[in-house]
Amino acid sequence: MAFAAAVVAIAALAACSSATVTATPAAEPALAPSSAAAASTPAPPAELTVADFVDRFGPTTGDMVWLSGAEVEDEFHAAAAAFPLDLPAGYTWPTGLSRSLGTVTEYQRGTGVAEAYLYWEAAHATAAYADSRSGDMVSAVAQVEVLVDGYASPIRSMYVDPEEPGTDSEYYRSVLEPALNGDLEPLLHAQVASFISTDEYLAIAAQAGDEIRVGTEGFSRSVDDQPGDPGYIEDVRVELEHRIPSE
């Protein structure tokens, strides 16, 4: 109010003196953006912390919630949009999941969140493997370190292997620890092979500059190895149970 009164008083004095004094035109001040223009520019969404993400998407107590395949897709996209960990440089979230989930309501709440985490994990594994194939082991190990940080976070363990939080797990010892030491072969079979077997995911890696051509990368074993084949490395992680709820 005091500032407004001062402005009015200055304007009145200027009007009284204008009859006798020729004012020198002042330089026009730069125009500030109008409030309407400012309002038309949406503010970027606030990034969630890991704790916020877990609080928003984590398991709930009480009655079990079951989702249809379409609802799992919706949950996946919501989790991807709010995911607090960065994808590798140049990678983007896919338009959908790599597999069809059908339409039957048979998936536990959190399945889409787990799928978002697993995509993030496999994207970093693929980026790490591509760096190793190009001979940049420093970047490859740095990617694995980022992957391990996410693996050790509650983002993974709230739905994937909830009984093995952190890095005290067989998967860490048999797949991630060797990768930290420069051996990405276990990571190739546990993560990368399935990622690049999806056309859209392979294209996402390629657009980021990580072109991995199946059959020409010098794999010591085929990416199509099946359980029982010599050297097959099984992904032993336990995800959410997929079943039709009992009546």
Image (spheres, rainbow, N blue to C red):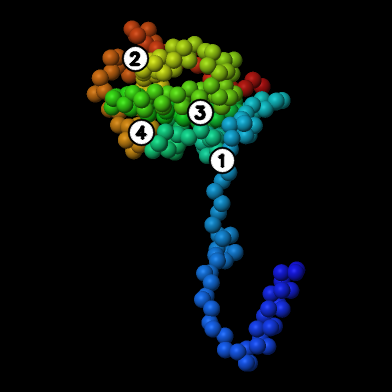
Query: What amino acid is found at the position of numbered circle 2 in the picture?
Result: Asp
CB within 8 Å, label 1 to label 2: no
Of all residues, the one furthest to the right in this rendering is: 1
Q: CA distance from mark 4 to mark 3?
A: 17 Å
Residue behind mark 2: 225
Give how far across and how far down residue 73 sits, in percent: 52, 34
- As displayed, is residue 165 above or below residue 51? above
- Residue 8 can be seen, yes or no: yes
Q: Nearer the viewer, mark 1 or mark 3?
A: 1
CB within 8 Å, label 1 to label 4: no
Indicate which disc residue 129 carries: none
Q: Nearer the viewer, residue 16 or 205?
A: 16
Q: Is residue 132 left or right of residue 14?
A: left
Nearer-N-terminus badge (1/2): 1
Nearer-N-terminus badge (2/3): 3
Element type at marker 3? Answer: helix
Nearer-N-terminus badge (4/2): 4
Nearer-N-terminus badge (4/3): 3
Residue behind mark 4: 205
Which residue is drawn at the image coordinates 45% and 37% (left, top)?
A: 93
Q: CA distance from mark 1 to mark 4?
A: 24 Å
Which residue is drawn at the image coordinates 32% and 32% (left, top)?
A: 210
Image quarter of residue 71: top right
Query: What amino acid is found at the position of numbered circle 3 in the picture?
Result: Tyr
Q: CA distance from mark 1 to mark 2?
A: 40 Å
Mark 1 neighbour class, 10 Å CA radius: few under 14, some 14 to 19, many 20 or more: few
Of all residues, the one furthest to the front in this rendering is: 21
Residue behind mark 3: 117
